[in-house]
Image: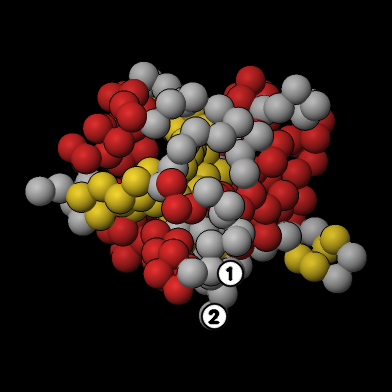
Amino acid sequence: MGATFVNYQARSNESDNVVQVVKDLVIKKAYVSPPKQGWVTIYDEKADDEINYYEISYICKQLSALLSTAIFAFIAYQGIYFAYLLYVNGELIDEFNSDPEGFTFGFDYFDYCDNWITEKFKGDANKLVQYSTITTDLQAINICLKNIQKGILLGKEFILGEEAIYFFAPLLGIDEGRATTGFRYFEDDLYQGYSDIIEDAQFFKLVQRL
């Protein structure tokens, strides 16, 4: 079974306010990163434990509303599936699911797929481009989303699960090392001293409700 994890990416150049908001929302524990390239990463223990789409959506919405900013939730499931949610100021702006026909991520909105469902979860590059890097254009985002949804082969590699995030996150300027892990993997690596993938892992702040 491949990697399963959740992380949140907050559009922010400072992390202190993120830490305070996360402290009020977290049920178990979370790690909050220093800002990097305009993004702060959040690893939530409960989100990783359950992979409940509705709860992940709720936390993403609350983070976005309380911080008055854009928040992405990245979800990888069993190394095969990838979904994201984008909330801005508490409003759902965009969502993508590489498997809109299935029962992925613990929510079964339908047991069939029609054009409406496919359209809803295909992602909208027009809504993402304002959060992308200077060198990323609309076409690049469109191609990436379409390739992920089709599982297009790149050489011998399928764009699946965390691999999809690896290609998608840099278009937004989000560090791929931060974006391709979650609470459990991060904490395990931190305790075992394997923090080379995330070079500033020692500066992430552990947040837990007292």
**Secondary structure beneath label 1:** loop
Q: Bin the neighbour count of mark 1 within 10 Å (Cα to Cα): few under 14, some 14-19, many 20 and up.
A: some
Is 108 in front, or is 116? 108
Q: Which residue is drawn at 24% across and 32% down?
A: 20
Q: Position of residue 47 (x, y in %)?
A: 33, 56
**Residue 39 rendering spot, x and y as whole percentages:** 52, 33
Identify residue type, mark 2.
Met
Which of the labelled discs sits on residue 1, or is there none?
A: 2
Instruction: Give x and y (percent) for residue 206.
Output: 30, 50
> In the image, is residue 85 above or below residue 91?
below
38 over 50 or under it: above or below: above
Contact? badges 1 and 2 (CB < 8 Å): yes
In percent of the image, x 63 and y 20: which residue is there? 130
Q: Is residue 27 rendered to the left or right of residue 150?
A: left
* Crowd class of label 2 (few under 14; some 14 to 19; many from 20; radius 10 Å): few
Report the residue marked by disc 1: 79
**Quarter of the view holding residue 138:** top right
Front-most of residues 108 and 69? 69
Which quarter of the picture shows residue 91?
top left
Foreground pick, 162 / 103: 162
Total tally of numbered discs in the picture: 2
Is 166 left or right of 72, judged from the image as shown? right
Sequence-wise, the earlier of marks 1 and 2 is 2
Q: What element carries label 2?
A: loop
Whether residue 95 is visible, yes or no, is yes
Q: Which residue lies furthest to the right in this view?
A: 155
Q: Where is residue 140 in the image (x, y as percent from the top left)?
A: 80, 35
